[in-house]
Amino acid sequence: MASPSEIRAMRRAIALSAHGLGTTSPNPPVGCVILDARGHPVGEGYHRRKGEAHAEGNALRAAGVAARGGTAVVTLEPCNHVGRAPACRQLLIEAGIARAVVALIDPTSRDEGGVTALRNAGVDVETGVLADEARLVLGPWLGALRLGRPVVTWAYVTDDTGTSGALERVSAAGQLRIGADAVLRVDGHLEEGVPDAHGAGVLRVPPHLPVLDPASTLRALYADGIRFLLLDVGPDLAGPFVAAGLVDHVVAYLPDEPSPSRVPMGGKSSVVPADFRIARIERVAGHVRVHATRFNTTVEHL
């Protein structure tokens, strides 16, 4: 059973992992905290973007020799393959880690898997620690793997005349753009890179991809490394995605002070499309924000 210090470290690792949202795809956003042999945190890190060090590597670098005999607390199973970054399970073994606490098993593990490799090396491993909480960050990545396409969120503004994709009018919508790998804009073009909170480019999306066939568009984006797509479009362009069952979540922004003398949404009775249910609703600056998910969906939303 995970100790209180390991539980605290896992929650810290989950928070760290969210810093990688929108910059790591097709890799997962992962966080890691290293505890020394006495259970004190001595290093932490997260995966910043594809091609750079993974969470475990960054945390071990911060911990240095204090990691020997300690515990690695990580939100996803340490990888077991060598790519642009070294295999994380090998880094942990070489650093002298005695115990690993893991939230979720990686469904893309190669061969025997990182957990098995660690155990074979004599490392004590516990899995499933705060798995549901870790899935709040890793859920869209896991959902995209399961679907074989990006997880799609359609975000729009509503007013007295209906829906509009003009998200630039909503300051609170910036968080959706930061967490997305790509944005299909209101003019029907794909942005070539969505900046993260520090202004860094994320992924280059081929601007010539068709949007007339939603299924083939999403397959092409998935092959290009996109795992979370934001539709910043109006209903005409989003309609084919919704009709094909390819929109997983919607986020609607309602004016904070609707006119009492007008029938909202041009006479339409629903804020969100049919087959969606409201999952969360909150007031933000200038708007009421409605989060909705498709009925029976198993794909988590950011």
Image: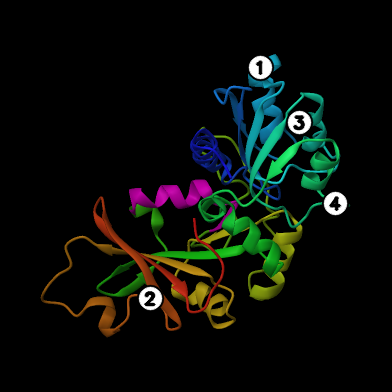
Select label 4 or label 2 by which is in front. Answer: 4
Asked if 121 appears above or below 206 in the picture, the reply is above
Q: Which residue is mark 2?
A: 272
Amino acid marked by disc 1: Ala
Q: Which residue is mark 4?
A: 110
- Earlier in the chain: of badge 3 and badge 4, it is 3
Range shown magenta: 170-184
Say how many tags the image has. Answer: 4
Q: Position of residue 33 (x, y in %)?
A: 59, 31
Asked if 249 appears above or below 193 in the picture, the reply is below
The span from disc 3 to disc 1 (Cα, nearest Å) is: 12 Å
Q: Are marks 4 and 2 in contact (CB under 8 Å)?
A: no
- At 54% from the left and 74% from the top, the residue drawn is 297
Select label 1 or label 2 by which is in front. Answer: 1
Identify the image quadrant of the N terminus. Answer: top right
- Earlier in the chain: of badge 4 and badge 1, it is 1
Q: Which residue is mark 3?
A: 92
Amino acid marked by disc 4: Arg
